[in-house]
Image: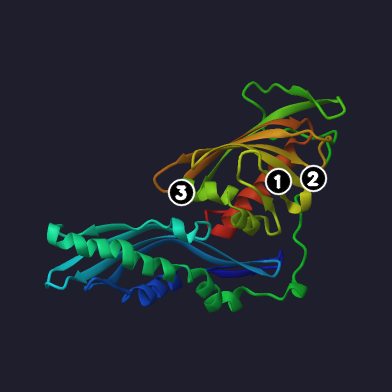
Amino acid sequence: MSNWKNVNNWVNKNCLNWAKTYFQQELVGIEAEKNGIQTSVSKVTEVTGDVDLNQRKGKIITIFDVELKLEWTGTAPDGTEAQGRILIPEVAHDTDIDDYVFEISVTDDSNAKRAIKEVVRKELAAKLRQKLSTFARDLVKAHGADVYIDPSQLGTAPPPRVASATKDSTPATKGHDGASTTGADKRGKIVNTTSLEEAVEFQTSAHELYETLLDSQRVAAWTRGSAKMSREIGGKFEYFNGNVSGEILETIPDKKIVQKWRLSTWPESHYSQVTFTFDQASDSTKLIVKQTGVPIGEEEVTQRNWTAYYWNSIKQTFGFGAVF
């Protein structure tokens, strides 16, 4: 279990092992009854996913997304017995408790057992939903002291370093044909631009990486500050004390994100366009990043900012791979 503190106003603790014990202790034995039919959770067979507790500028944040597999037993008044499984695909910090899904199955299904299964589906699932609603609170109660630092002892998170063009600036990468393009800022001034492209590998799923780039709490974690983030189409975002800002143009869940994106030192109202494409492999995800409209002379600093303040920070915060 990792637990680390950093002077840049962020603290993180991996609580997955604690969560596995918690669900065993809190969910096994939960009972529900209706019309004389008795049902209960008999076992937690599997807990997989991520459970983290974070502090950002004195505020404790829970970030979790787990899948639960349970077993249940039931008995009808006539002595009929039944058992089966409950799959809860997602218990997550950003999912409303009423949206949790309970997939109920019964072993050796028969007409005699269906009334028992129905009590599990309606009554026992409701009891489980009620208990799961307290998970975030219990997580903070159990581990909040481990990640809390008094805000007066926190430093100031460094913003991305931005710079204007210099005579010896060399583009990190260019578009497919190496050609530059031109645009105009708000005042009609011509802005010569070029393109950047890179592929970055993360040791996580496409879904988790997609959520890391769009979920407001996760963004606050890896930007190490009070980031503003709206994942809706047309929604605005602002990171690093306003040094990075933009707008969401297109999203395809777990597949693609398209953004308007700019640094604060760029010509007024000039935005690049960034396309993130997610390529899921068996044990990792390759993120392909294509950025058009980068002002000439800003290529190097833009590339460095992606590496240092996006990719390395995400990997360090969530353990998604080695940092280079």
Q: Quadrant of residue 156?
A: bottom right
What residue sits 20% from the left and 60% below the top?
106
Tell which of 32 and 264 is nearer to you: 32
Name the amino acid type tagged 2: Val
How far apart are the alpha carbons under marks 3 and 2? 31 Å
Which residue position is annotated with label 2?
162
Q: Is residue 10 above or below residue 196?
A: below
Label 1 secondary element: helix
**Is residue 192 shown above or below 280?**
above
For image coordinates 42% across by 71% down, the residue present is 131
- Residue most toward the front? 35
Residue 143, percent from left and from top: 55, 76
**Is any part of residue 40 visible from this angle?**
no
Q: Residues under labels 1 and 2: Cα distance? A: 8 Å
Mark 1 belongs to which amino acid? Asn
Disc on the earlier residue, 1 or 2:
2
Q: Answer whether labels 3 and 2 touch (C-beta < 8 Å).
A: no
The answer to which quarter of the image holds residue 147 is bottom right
Amino acid type shown at disc 3: Ser
In primary-sequence order, the first of circles 3 and 1 is: 3
Residue 234 rendering spot, x and y as whole percentages: 65, 38
Give the colour scheme shown.
rainbow
Horizontally, is 189 left or right of 223 in the view?
A: right
Q: Which residue is mark 3?
A: 205
Circles 1, 2 touching at the beta carbon (< 8 Å):
yes
Per the image, the residue denoted by label 1 is 305
The location of residue 232, given as percent across then percent down, is 61, 43
